[in-house]
Structure formats: structure tokens, C-alpha cells
Image (tube, grey):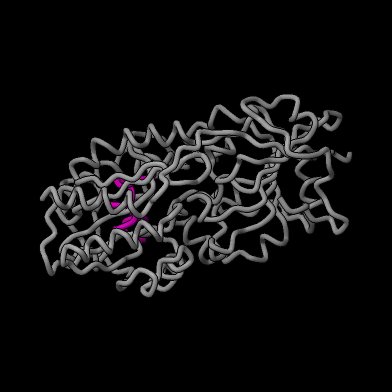
Amino acid sequence: MEYQFTKVRQTFDSFRIADVEQATAEAVTRKLNSGNPLIPAGASIAIAAGSRGIANIAKIVKTIAAVVKGKGAHPFILPAMGSHGGSTAEGQVEILASYGITEEAMGCPIRSSMEVVGIENGGLEMPLFMDRHAFESDGVIIVNRIKPHTAFHGDYESGLIKMSVIGLGKARLASELHRYGLYGLKTLLPQAGKQILAAGKIVLGIGVVENAYDETAIIEALTPEEILAREPELLISAKRMMPSLPLDEIDVLVVDRIGKDISGSGMDPNIIGRMRIDGMPEPQSPTVKSIVITDLTEASHGNACGIGLADVTTRRLVDKVNWDATYANGVTSGFYSHVALPIVAQTDRQALDWGIRASHEPHKVKRIVRIPDTLHISELYVSEAALAELKGDLEILGGPMNLLEEEDSLIEF
């Protein structure tokens, strides 16, 4: 059955910070000028940047480094990542570089190592570790986007607490924490974060919240004490700004690309309505019967974590996968289903056909939705049956049209 598609645009809250560099400088300067924390002249200050795709991350990190320099201190940047970059120091530097964070661009050194130092665990049932360069510095500023996590929900999800544990703890602490599964993420993560903040090495956290268009909406500089109280509030703001698909039931969802720069899980389970984690209930909405993924982002460096959330993929995507990096991520997290290989189609047409077949009910006209990725869902293609059920503020951009070209590839978005 050939389907015709209409291109539509959703409208979300578009509030954003107009001048990210100015907002960052003002937030950091205001906090440092308060005397708490105090960065003395000559201090070695580590700026911890992670592997998540964060809008304006290079501008934010460079501005922080400039403010630290203005205080007479000596900033350096370290990759605050668990097993990303294939669990290698070189791979993590490459990830930072893909975001525009290089020594030349930032004007300060980058020090990358997988070596960690054990720190006091405060009686927790697992050991705690910190990146050696961070531990040996005079203070650490952590930078991270605060957003809903892709595997669990709680007061602290993806954000500064998680960065202080899994980011600064590198692959060693990431592996230790993930051994406990959901209990580790929901219960031990905040306990470990509080212990690490209490150790006194972290002097500031820079919390970033983005709007539904992947634009910077909030930047706040927080002391360790403020992080504990403020992060849950910023998480609520992030959830309020988060985009969603404009219908509750989808037969086939086509996702053009996945990648670690898109989501920690390759594609955001909160968007696709599918987590596939034992003990964690699936999102109530949307309900998606079949998911097709067709490509992998270059910035993911071959890490195809999240491929297992799909039912069908393409040979094009599979040929780009670095399985060592992908499995390192999957084994560390313990969510093996997320790196399992789905059925592989040779062309986009075959992938779509197989996705339609996997949704069952062969005589039913299918509700099919196509999106670029889970970070960008303001514009999407929908089949006629899906168009009839759309909700929200929508604009028709074009169609009806065929999504496939003569060579069986999807047309450009």
C-alpha cells in the first residue's frame, strides 16, 4: 500500500536567551563576586563538560573559562563522561572537539584521562571515584543540561548531580553505579551526588535548560548547596518545555537519525514512548507499535546506543556502527536491550514496508509519523490517518506527497 504524507509544523513555547555568552558571564561573575565560592588568583580550575548534545555548549564553556581567567585563575577543560568515547581519553577528547570544544577554540588546555581517584563514600554501599585531574585541581565547575532522564524519573535526573557522579567518576564510577540498575539511578545516584558535593571539590554548577526547539532558555550558576535545592525545580521547568508528538497512538514511527548527540539513549524514550528497561513502566503516551530508524549521526562517533529501541533499521545505519563503542556504552549502563540489533533492511523503502508489517492489523490504514530525530520534532511528516488525529497548534507546510524517491530512499526532510 502506497501512503501519501503531509508535512506539518508544531508550535511550542519558544522563549530563549538572546545572548548566551552575556547570560553565562553574568551568572558566573555574579556568583563568584559573592565570595561564595571564592576562586583565588593562581588557582587551577577544572571546567567539566560532558558528551550530551547541548545547544551553545562551546560558547558557554569558553565564557566560563574567560570569567575564571578574569579572576586570575587558570582554567582547564576536562571531559566529564562515563563510558562515552569508547571509554578512552582520546575518544572523549574527540567528542568535545565535535562540539567545537578544542584547546585552540577555548583558549585553555584540555586534560583528558580515564584515571580516577577514590574518595570518601560516606558509608554508601558502593565506592566513589573522581577524575584524577579534577581531584588534583583547586576546584571544579560542572556544566550540564538539566532534562528528563531517558531511563528513570525522580527529583534528580539528567543534570548537575548526575554529572558530578557519572561524569566526574568516569567509566569506573559509571560502571559501579549501573551495576545496581534502576535502584542505582533512582536511589544511589542522588546519595552519591550529595556526598561528592559535600567533599568540597566542586565549587560551581552551571545548569542549562533548553526549550522545545533545542535552544538555550535558562542558564544558572549554582553553589553546591544551591544545586541540591534548585536542580529539582529546574527539572520541572525542563519537563514543562519538553516537546511531544502531536498524537497519542502511532502505528509506525520513522526516525531519520539517532546518536549520542541527540540523546543519551540515542533517541529519547520520553518522545518515542518506549524505554525497554525491566522494572521501569513505559511512558503512557505516545503508544507506538513499530519504530524504524534509518541513520546514525556523525557526531555520535559510531556509538549506536539506542538502536535496540527500534524494530527495524537500515544497512546504511549499521555500516556506520562502531560496535566496540556501542557495546562499551551498553555494558556500562546494563541496558543490553538498547544495543541489540533489530532487523536490518537494505533500503529505506524496505525498512518502511517492514515497519508497517510489524505494526500488524494488515487491513488497517496506518498512522505513520516521520521525524528527523527526537530533538527536532517541530516539523514532521504524517500519513492521512495520522493527520486526522493530530492535536495542538499545527500548520500545514505541504503535501500530500510520496516520501520515497525512485532509488528507494527517503526524501530530504
Can you give x and y, in whole percent of width and height, for residue 348 in the image? 78, 53
Q: Which residue is rendered at x = 36% and y = 34% of the image?
A: 154
Residue nearer the viewer, 328 or 249: 249
Task: Write down the quadrant of residue 389 in the picture.
Answer: top right
Residue nearer the viewer, 166 or 399: 399
Residue nearer the viewer, 130 or 6: 6
Residue 96 in sight: yes
Instruction: Give the total of numbered labels.
Output: 0
Assess whether residue 161 is covered by the magenta stretch.
yes
Can you give x and y, in whole percent of width and height, for residue 102 in the image? 40, 71
Which quadrant, please, contains the N terminus? top right
Residue nearer the viewer, 152 or 228: 228
Left or right relative to 60: residue 52? right
Q: Is residue 401 above or below residue 251?
A: below
Q: Which residue is rendered at x = 39% and y = 47% of the image?
A: 145
Q: Main secondary structure of the magenta part?
A: helix
> What residue range appears in magenta?
158-176
Q: Which residue is rendered at x = 61% and y = 48% of the image?
A: 373
Residue 82 in sight: no
Q: Which residue is rendered at x = 26% and y = 47% of the image?
A: 221
Assess whether residue 160 is covered by the magenta stretch.
yes
Can you give x and y, in whole percent of width and height, for residue 344 in the image? 73, 55
Left or right relative to 407: residue 11? left
Q: Is residue 131 above or below residue 308?
A: below
